[in-house]
Image (tube, grey):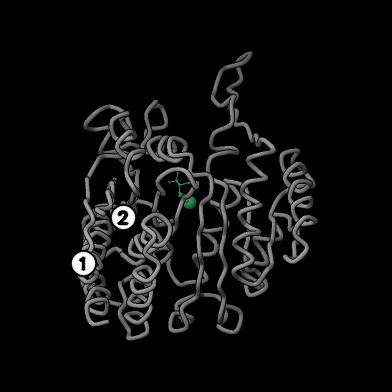
Amino acid sequence: MKANIVVLPGDGIGPEVMAQAVRTLETVAKKGNRSFCFTEQLVGGCSIDAHGVALTEGVLAACQSADAVLLGAVGGPKWDDPRSGVRPEQGLFALRKGLGVFANLRPVAVHPSLVEASPIRPERIEGVNILVIRELTGGLYFGEPKGREMRGGVECAVDTLEYKDFEVRRIVELAFRLARGRKKKVTSVDKANVLESSRMWRRIATEIGEANPDVELEHVLVDTAAMRLIASPATLDVVVTENTFGDILTDEASVLVGSMGMLPSASLNEETPGLYEPIHGSAPDIAGKGIANPVGMILSAAMCLRHSLGLEAEARLVEKATRDAISDGARTVDLGGALSTREMADEVIARIEAA
Ligand code: IPM
Ligand code: MG
């Protein structure tokens, strides 16, 4: 069977890292005698330029009927005017919501030979392997009302943090299921001392914890979690949290692994195609230079092999080739090396071919 993969390179460094992820998947396909059909489409700023919107209905429909969707990055200074009604990020949100991918898995595994690349002391981060599960289709990103208006001569801006009970239940239940295949420990992150939504989150997480006594559950306030992520990251295994907290904590977590360019993600829902994107952004400062780290995007493609295409062995192959390349010293500039985006991918691809 031919897998249909929609490829959304997006803006900035998105197209540069995407080209390498596609090459990697093509290598995997050739090696295993499989075939993937890639269809490239627009999202983000490039879609605004071409169509006036960050995601057209046609592209969303193509994504909904694909087997999986790969996304590079969206955004850039060109589309940053705060007065503009259209923003590149809207494409991302329309895609996440339109695919219903509520579970965003962000694995954070410290590579032994990159321990020195992190500003955190080696003994604190050695062996760190965390799975952050970020709720992706609720919370502040989508809550209504949302907007800005003048009230009695005062400009007011509002965002709404809303969760429905079933949205919390399904993501925390997923955290427990995934924890069973790991260290059987779930850290639920909230701000229950302040937020109503967090108090409901904590109550539901507690209920799920009571129903699953084989998995240890701890509740941690998000400010404390931010501190623990740096001070004692090895005490964390599966971390589950709401949309905005997960966004912030995963940028922080990228400091542990040496570079933002390293981290992949998978956005899932059992019934729809998965969406795979690195956690980094479009990095306009280095776009077009061919120096971006492609590892986050390549590892996102590996997650796509695993979660959407049912190719676990191939996923592991890509992950091992990436780890081995790094162990052997392959580094892009963000990690203090000199390899270009393409050369870094060459190192990974050569190891897949040789395996
Ligand atoms: C991420 C990014 C996005 C988010 C931005 C680009 C809107 O930071 O995927 O982490 O906030 O979700
Ligand atoms: Mg982010």
The residue lying at 75 percent from left, 66 percent from top is 214
In the rendered view, tell whether residue 326 sits above or below residue 21: below
Q: Earlier in the sequence, mark 1 or mark 2?
A: 1
CA gap, disc 1 to disc 2? Answer: 39 Å
**Image vertical order of residue 245 relative to residue 300, above or below:** above
Task: Return the residue at label 2.
Answer: 285
Marking on residue 221? none
Horizontal side of 285 relative to 241 (left or right) equals left
Q: Could you say where residue 263 lies in the image, as x and y percent from the top left? A: 43, 63
Q: Is residue 59 above or below residue 23?
A: above
| Dot 1 crowding, Cα within 10 Å, few <14, some 14–19, many 20+ | few
Q: Quadrant of the N terminus?
A: bottom left
- Using a 10 Å C-alpha cutoff, classify the residue at mark 2 as few (fewer than 14 neighbours), some (14 to 19) or many (20 or more): few
To which residue does mark 1 refer? 33
Q: Label 1, secondary structure: give it.
A: loop
Q: Disc 1 vs disc 2: which is toward the camera?
A: 1
Q: Determine the image quadrant of residue 335.
A: bottom left
Q: Nearest the camera: 32 or 173?
A: 32
Give the structural element (helix, strand or loop) at label 2: loop
In the image, what residue type sits under mark 2? Answer: Asp
| Vertical order, 255 against 167 (above or below) | below
Q: Is residue 9 visible?
A: no
Residue 44, quarter of picture: top left
Which amino acid type is shown beneath numbered disc 1? Asn
Left or right relative to 145: residue 88: left
Query: Residue, x 77% and y 47% (percent of image)?
Result: 192
Q: Nearer the viewer, residue 302 or 326?
A: 302
Q: Nearer the viewer, residue 199 or 120?
A: 199
Residue 103 shows in this picture: yes
Residue 307, horizontal then vertical, whole percent: 43, 58
Q: Residue at x 65, y 34 (%)?
A: 162
Residue 338: image x %, image y %?
A: 26, 76
